[in-house]
C-alpha cells in the first residue's frame, strides 16, 4: 500500500484528489495539508511514501518547501501545478530541485477523471523512485566530442522517457556536440510544461532544443520535443525528415507516447535511426524498440542503477531488441558511438 500526503491550499483540490486516489486499492491517502507548515508535521507523524505538492501556497511556496524536504528528509515528491506560464517555469525549477514528476491540475486539456488516473500512475512510479539529497551540478559540459560524426544528414535519434526523464534528458543533451544528428523526443509531460522544458534545455545545450511544431524539419544539431497532449511522429519527403504533431487516442495512458514515435521512426528512418529508452514507469517504448530493431536501427536502454524507475528500460530489454544497456553517465558517448 502506497501512503500519500496531499499538500494544496485549495480545499476543493484536496477533496478531489482524495476521492479519486481512494478508488485505487493500492493507494492510501493518509492526510491532506493546506500549507507546508502543516505538511511538515504530518510528514513526521504519518511517514508518507509520496507527497503531492502545489507550488503557489500561502506562508511558504512549494519550491522552498521542496528544497527543505530534499535537504532534511528526502522522499518522492510530485508537483501538481496549474497550467500558467509562471507555474510552468516554477515547475521546471522544481524538477531541478528534486521533484520526481510534474502534473497539471484538472482543467484545460485534462478532465478530472484523466487527472485522477494519471496521478495514481505517477504515485505508484514515485513510490519506487530513488530519491537522494541533491548533488551539486557538474562544473561544465563535455568538451568537443571524442568521436567525429560524419554523414549526419540521414541519421535520426529517437528518445523515449517518463518518470525521471527530465533530468536524464538534461544530463544527456547538455553533453552532446553541436553537430549531433537530429533528435526527436517523447517525454511523458502535460501541455505547456514541454515548452518550458525545451526552452530551459535550449539555454544549456550546444544543440538547438525546442518544442516541436507541425512540419518541423529534423536536422543535425536540432532536438524536437513532443508537445504535451500531442503525439510526435517522424515523416519523410525525399531526403528530408520532418515531424507530424497530432492528437489521437492515448497510448499506454499517455499522449505523447513513445511507441507511436518509435514506430514512425522505424518506418521512415529504418537502419539510419537510433532508439533510446530512458527511465520511466510502464512498458511504453518496448513495442516500438522492437519494431525499430526489426527495421535495422541500433538501440540503447538505460541501466537499472541509474534509472529513477526501471520500468520502461526493463521492458525494452526484455524484448531482446536492445543492443546496449548503459548508465546515464555513459549514455551521451554511447549515443555518439552507435549513431
Image (cartoon, rainbow, N blue to C red):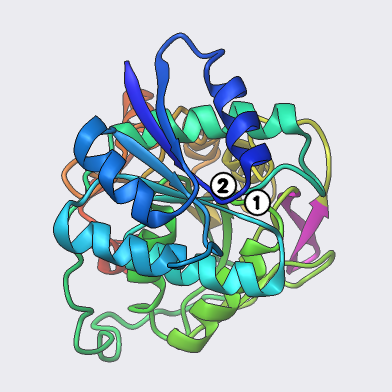
- The picture quadrant where one finds residue 56 is bottom right
Tell me: residue 206, above or below residue 82. Answer: below
Give the number of the mark in front: 2 or 1: 1
Nearest the viewer among 25 and 154 is 25
The residues colored magenta run 230-245
User: Which quarter of the image is occupied by the N terminus?
Assistant: top left
In the rendered structure, does residue 240 fall within the stretch colored magenta? yes
Q: Would you say 315 lies left or right of 111 here?
A: left
| Residue 157 location (% of width, % of height) | 51, 60
Tell me: residue 143, above or below residue 290. Answer: below
Nearest the viewer among 237 and 224 is 224
In the rendered structure, does residue 164 fall within the stretch colored magenta? no
**Within 10 Å of the Cα at label 1, are there few (<14), some (14-19), or many (20+) other Cα atoms?**
many
- The picture quadrant where one finds residue 174 is bottom left
Query: Which disc, if any, is residue 188?
Result: 2
Q: Residue at x 25, y 46 (%)?
A: 75
Tell me: residue 213, above or below residue 151. Answer: above
Task: Quote the CA–CA distance across marks 2 and 1.
Answer: 7 Å
**Can residue 339 be seen in the rendering of this structure?**
no
Pointer 1: what residue? 190
- The picture quadrant where one finds residue 219 is bottom right
Q: Residue at x 54, y 83 (%)?
A: 202
Determine whether the residue tagged by mark 2 lies in a helix, strand or loop: loop
**Within 10 Å of the Cα at label 2, are there few (<14), some (14-19), or many (20+) other Cα atoms?**
many
Q: Residue at x 56, y 13 (%)?
A: 23
| Residue 172 location (% of width, % of height) | 35, 68
Q: Residue at x 28, y 33 (%)?
A: 49
* Magenta segment, prevailing SS (helix, strand or loop): strand
| Residue 233 location (% of width, % of height) | 72, 50
Amino acid at each position: 500500500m502506497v501512503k500519500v500526503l496531499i499538500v494544496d491550499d485549495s480545499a476543493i483540490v484536496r477533496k478531489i484528489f482524495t476521492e479519486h486516489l481512494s478508488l485505487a486499492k493500492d493507494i492510501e491517502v493518509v492526510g491532506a495539508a493546506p500549507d507546508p507548515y502543516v505538511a511538515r508535521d504530518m510528514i513526521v507523524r504519518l511517514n508518507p511514501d509520496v507527497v503531492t505538492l502545489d507550488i503557489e501556497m500561502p506562508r511558504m511556496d512549494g519550491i522552498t518547501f521542496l528544497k527543505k524536504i530534499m535537504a532534511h528528509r528526502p522522499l518522492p515528491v510530485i508537483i501538481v501545478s496549474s497550467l500558467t506560464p509562471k507555474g510552468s517555469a516554477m515547475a521546471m525549477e522544481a524538477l531541478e530541485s528534486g521533484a520526481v514528476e510534474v502534473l497539471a491540475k484538472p482543467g484545460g486539456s485534462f478532465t478530472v477523471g484523466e487527472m485522477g488516473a494519471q496521478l495514481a500512475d505517477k504515485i505508484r512510479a514515485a513510490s519506487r523512485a530513488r530519491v537522494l539529497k541533491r548533488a551539486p551540478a557538474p562544473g561544465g559540459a563535455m568538451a568537443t566530442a571524442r568521436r567525429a560524426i560524419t554523414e549526419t544528414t540521414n541519421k535520426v535519434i529517437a528518445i523515449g522517457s517518463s518518470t525521471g526523464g527530465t533530468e536524464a534528458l538534461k544530463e544527456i543533451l547538455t553533453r552532446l556536440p553541436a553537430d549531433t544528428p537530429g533528435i526527436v523526443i517523447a517525454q511523458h509531460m502535460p501541455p505547456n510544461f514541454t515548452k518550458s522544458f525545451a526552452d530551459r534545455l535550449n539555454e544549456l545545450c550546444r544543440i538547438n532544443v525546442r518544442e516541436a511544431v507541425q512540419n518541423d524539419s529534423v536536422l543535425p544539431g536540432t532536438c524536437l520535443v513532443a508537445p504535451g497532449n500531442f503525439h510526435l511522429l517522424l515523416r519523410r519527403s525525399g531526403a528530408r525528415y520532418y515531424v507530424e504533431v497530432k492528437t489521437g487516442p492515448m497510448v499506454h495512458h499517455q499522449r505523447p507516447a513513445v511507441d507511436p514515435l518509435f514506430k514512425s521512426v522505424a518506418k521512415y528512418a529504418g537502419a539510419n535511426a537510433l532508439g533510446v529508452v530512458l527511465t520511466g514507469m510502464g512498458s511504453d517504448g518496448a513495442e516500438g524498440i522492437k519494431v525499430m530493431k526489426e527495421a535495422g536501427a541500433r538501440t540503447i536502454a538505460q541501466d537499472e542503477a541509474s534509472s529513477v524507475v526501471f520500468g520502461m528500460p526493463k521492458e525494452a530489454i526484455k524484448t531482446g531488441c536492445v543492443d546496449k544497456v548503459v548508465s546515464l553517465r555513459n549514455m551521451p558517448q554511447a549515443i555518439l558511438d552507435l549513431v
